[in-house]
Image: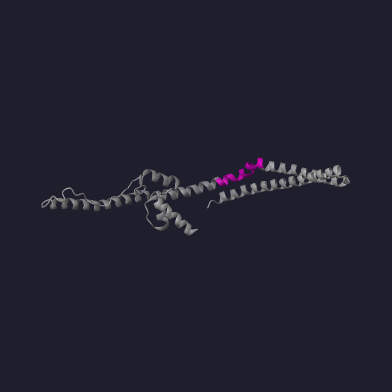
Amino acid sequence: MYQELEAFKVRVANLETKIASLKGEKLDCEEQINQLEAEIGQALLDNALDGTAWDENRIKNLKEQKAGLQDKINLLEERISVFENNRKEALLPYVGELEVGYRREMEQLRAQFTELDKDTSKKVAEYFLHLASMNKVLKQAQDLHSDFLQQSGMATDKHKDSKMSFPRVELFNDYTGVGKGIGRKEQEQALAYGYIPHFVKLYEMSGEIVLNKNEAAARIRELERQEA
């Protein structure tokens, strides 16, 4: 766990919280000033229009409250400015330990990545061996078909132009979107962005194999709804 980073985030959050608190205090003072100004204005209006008795002491008190709040606002603005302008300086002493933690964590991730990469060639080799195993069966079928044509041709021309009926494997098919192979684009997207085809994600989630992209995506959404 990158403890230094978490500690640094806490320090940053504390600074931001303090600044936000000061700004909140300032806003409260501004709202109180608005209320006082409204009250003073109403007293002036009442005296002018309705002949309401003029309470000089009350108005004086209101203005003193307003002046006190304005002084507080000025002080708050100074404090906010100091926090904001010196944010970097306040955090700078902790950058060293942040860098130490970064190097440690990055080295661990490098080692983990390198260890995983050791299996890359093995997985590729297994994939090619799997295709080679399929080829053995395909070759047997081709030999069987060839022998059948040759031997049946000794007696009849009925099967002379017969084509071998055998499953076709679409390793790459951009048109239908149901290719089974691993293209360069898919490899790069998986490594650089963590993107995997829908049928792979579905297999990871449930062990199901659905090659059609739209059908696999629909099944994924269904499983996600069930887990929600």
Residue 98 or residue 131, whichever sits in front: 131
Give the image's coloring scheme.
Answer: one colour
Residue found at x 74% / y 45%: 30
Specify start and end residues of the magenta stretch as a single range.
84-98
The residue at 16%/53% (across/down) is 148
Horizontal side of 200 relative to 102 (left or right) equals left
Instruction: Please give the name of the residue rendered at 64% of the width and 43% of the height, measured from the top-left corner.
Output: 87
Q: Position of residue 166 (x, y in %)?
A: 25, 52
**Total residue callouts:** 0
53 relative position to 14: left or right: right
Residue 142, x across and y down, in percent: 21, 50
User: Looking at the rendering, which quadrant does residue 222 occupy?
Assistant: bottom left
Q: Is residue 85 a member of the stretch shown in magenta?
A: yes
Q: Main secondary structure of the magenta part?
A: helix
Looking at this rendering, what residue extends furthest in the top direction? 85
Residue visible at 40% across and 50% down? 214
Asked whether residue 207 is drawn in magenta, I would say: no
Farthest bottom residue?
A: 226
Task: Tell me residue 59's x, y (percent).
Answer: 85, 45
Residue 66 percent coordinates (x, y): 79, 44
Q: Which residue sits furthest front?
A: 50
Say which of 146 and 106 sits in front: 146
